[in-house]
Amino acid sequence: MVSKKHILSDSLFTVVTLMVVFWVNLFLVEQYDTKTMTPMIFVLGVFLVSWRTQGYVFGIVSSLISVLAVNWAFTYPYWAFDLISPECISSAVVMLIVSSMTGALTTRLKQQEKLKAEAETERMRGNLLRAVSHDLRTPLTSIYGSCSAILENYDSISDERKRRLLKDIQTDSQWLNRMVENLLSVTRVDADTVRLSKHSTVLEELIDALLVKFHKHYPNQNVQVTIPEEFISIPMDPVLIEQVLMNLLENAVFHAHGMQNLRLRVELKSRKAVFSVEDDGCGIPQDRMNYLFTGLLDSEAPVDSTRSNMGIGLSVCRTIIKAHGSELKAVNRPDGGAAFSFALEMEEIGNVE
């Protein structure tokens, strides 16, 4: 069903187009005293309306209005209607044919685009299910194996071995919890919109909360933090932005092999706070850049054999940042490692509550 928004948009486009066509023809008549182009210009206007609007209604209406306009202003006797003249009838027939054919063509094209989009959605859903099942299977298998080993050999294995197996269970459980958080975030995210709960957030408080949460999971991983000394307030959804930064830091822990330094940097540039997470690890393979933010394991992409595939998290991150009016970018640093960055508009000091 066509929404009111589309009806208003199509109506406005139709009115503006017909007015432009009418005044262009008046200009040509006044300046060059020629009416030879009048029918063709009105036919062009009808074509544009039929092509731009949905369905047949606006094209047919614009055809009838165009016929009346030509008959009234550009056919003798001027500024009067003569609806039974052969020119009027032939113009009406031609314009109705143009509008009907164009409406049929555009309707068919839109239907094909809709079918193509539905097919792409199904393909993406299948890929997403495959990616999720792959990501969940490995840690679940590890947890099951460790639990079975402890239960079946409880008296025969050493306490140190038990601690290692329990540590593996804890690590895999933490990762599963993060995956569930990402999947729950997807319920707040669709292809175009995110339901944000925006309010003024102090940068220092956001970073402090993030680091407390991060070091709780990764006590042995140091993060070098660089933020401006001045008071910074940013309108954002702090829960989602914190999750974005958390995912970026976790991805570095899991995927930046050989990393020695992990940095979280916030810089001020033109009333924007630029967040960046940088590492000096192995960098991002160039063949993975094309689908880094898709959230899908492309059929031609190599499947990640580790338990921590980063695609779904980055897909959520990109959509969250897009909803905040920015773009999440990833680059390989010249001196080694990768950097992820995005920028958020800062709040004017006078607006801080």
Image: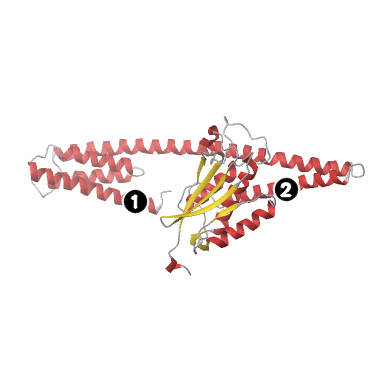
Give the percent coordinates (x, y) of residue 236: 50, 59
Q: Secondary structure at mark 2?
A: helix
Q: Nearer the viewer, residue 190 or 10?
A: 190
Query: Quick check: 190 left or right of 223?
Result: left
Q: How many marks?
A: 2
Query: Quick check: 17 left or right of 30?
Result: right
Query: Quick check: 106 left or right of 247?
Result: left
Q: Nearer the viewer, residue 188 or 302?
A: 302
Report which quarter residue 225 is drawn in: bottom right
Can residue 131 be seen in the rendering of this structure?
A: yes
Give the percent coordinates (x, y) of residue 207: 58, 58
Query: Quick check: 33 left or right of 157?
Result: left
Nearest to N terminus: mark 1 or mark 2: 1
- Residue kind at label 1, given as amino acid type: Ser
Report the residue at 12% width, 43% height from top. Answer: 28
Report the residue at 76% width, 40% height from top. Answer: 142
Foreground tag (1 vs 2): 2
Q: Residue furthest right?
A: 155
Label 1 – label 2 distance at C-alpha: 51 Å
Report the residue at 22% width, 39% height from top. Answer: 43
Query: Image height check: is 194 above or below 296?
Result: below
Residue 9: mark = 1
Q: Secondary structure at mark 1?
A: helix
Report the residue at 43% width, 64% height from top. Answer: 348
Q: Residues within 10 Å of mark 2 (few under 14, many from 20)?
A: some
Give yes or no for contact between labels 1 and 2 (Cβ–Cβ under 8 Å).
Answer: no
Q: Which residue is mark 2?
A: 173
- Residue kind at label 2, given as amino acid type: Ser
Give the percent coordinates (x, y) of residue 42: 20, 41
